[in-house]
Image (cartoon, grey):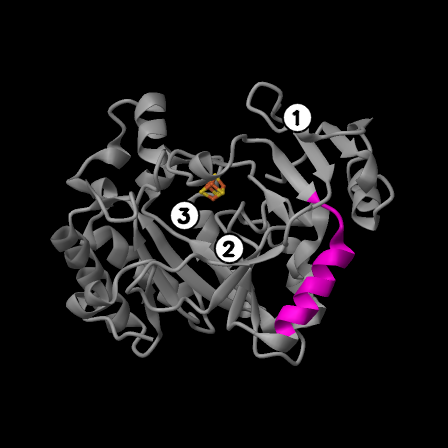
Amino acid sequence: MKISFNKLIINKAAENDPLTSLLRQRLPEAEVEVVSDSAPFLNPQRARSGSLVITHQMGKFIKDFPEAPGTPPCGEKYITTLLNCPFSCSYCYLQSYLDHRQIVVFTNTEKLKRELKTVLSNTPPSRITTGEMGDSLAIDHLTETTANLLPLFKNTETLLEVRTKSTNIEHLLRPPEKCSSRLSAIEGSDRLLVTWTLSPPHAIRKEEHGTATLEDRLVAISKISRSGIKVAIRFDPIIPFYFSRDKYEEIVKRLKKEAKNGIYRFELGILRFPPGLWENIRSKYPGSAIMRGEYHRDFEGKMRLYRPARVGIYRNLHRIISDHFNGVPVALSMEHNSVWEDAGIPLP
Ligand code: SF4
């Protein structure tokens, strides 16, 4: 199902931006309100489902992921082209990062492009993702962010990584059925990496409200892979309550079948709760299955599963992945070097 909006709240400063015009053109039925200050809409009382705030990014678009002491560098930066997403995962970390659930799109794209050119020529990371502050593809058919940024990655060593739990890919494959050359239609697509987060079907049903089913994500993976675009997989978060070796092995076997051109990399991470998120979820979903297990607060204030249990899950999954995708890099998300070593996963 394509996501749409019935109201656009446009900050006056963003009114004449090309991306604003594109959004108005794509959503001709949406009611439009131009405001001198969009900040009052970014609070939980005013945020309304179906509305989209359009404004300027006042801070930096591109940022580094925070690195905890003792963890290997992730080699990635992130771009904040939007805030929030139309899905509603019970564990969503944005609940503790942002003060509101309002979906916001930043339209001062020229500023973003200037920043991006500087980063790509001065300190190019291996990947830059648009999927840290929201799902990269959920509304990409409206914003065209991926197609707009991708040409800047041409002839660089950096991949643009879009992260998603959706199946909103058709606009990247124009038209998919006629893509006989195994090359995607969007310019610079050899620098594109589409990363899907996957979980067992019952975890998706219970905890990832509004996202695509596992089956539908696998179909989308198959299409993207056949088009020649690189595919990566995040098993992150792995929710301990829903973890079973068999269920994950089933998913990895299906990937082997569907991703005809292989998987570029896997990333594993067990659900952790940054400060504030644990309390937030406990008050919103008392007794939630996602909080079951032996959790402890770490030195950064995050709630994490008991270390031996984490190592056990990583070991199991790494073995399954190596059995089916021998030689494909596997990384852990925000885990100490010693956890990688104990789980038998080579450090990058
Ligand atoms: S898809 Fe990502 S950003 Fe969207 S609700 Fe789920 S965890 Fe949050």
**On the rendered structure, is 34 left or right of 287?**
right
* Secondary structure under the numbered disc 1 in the rendered image: helix
Q: Is residue 108 magenta?
A: yes
Residue type for callout 1? Phe
- The disc placed on residue 214 is 3
Q: Is mark 3 within 8 Å of ligand 1?
A: no
Would you say the residues marked 2 and 1 are in contact, meaning their CB atoms lie under 8 Å apart? no
Res. 163 mark: 2
Q: From the viewer's perspective, is residue 2 above or below residue 280?
A: below
Residue 182 makes an appearance in the image: no
Q: Is residue 318 visible?
A: yes
Per the picture, the main secondary structure of the magenta-coloured stretch is helix
Q: Nearer the viewer, mark 2 or mark 3?
A: 2
Reading the image, the residue beneath label 1 is 41
**x and y percent of residue 220 in the render?**
52, 55
**Dot 3: few (<14), some (14–19), or many (≥20) neighbours within 10 Å?**
many
Q: Left or right of 193: which side holds 54?
A: right
**Label 2 – label 1 distance at C-alpha:** 26 Å
* Callout 3 secondary element: helix
Q: What's the residue type where badge 2 is placed?
A: Arg
Per the model, the C-alpha gap separating discs 1 and 3 is 34 Å
Q: Which residues are magenta?
A: 106-120
Amino acid on which disc 3 is placed: Leu
Label located before the other in sequence (2 or 1): 1
Q: Quadrant of residue 175?
A: bottom right
Disc 2 C-beta below 8 A from ligand 1: yes
Tell whether 102 sits left or right of 341: right
Give the class, few, some or many, for how many residues have Cα within 10 Å of label 1's Cα (few <14, many ≥20): some
- For the point 16% across and 53% down, the residue is 307
The mark that comes first in sequence, 2 or 3, is: 2
Q: Determine if the magenta segment contains residue 299.
A: no
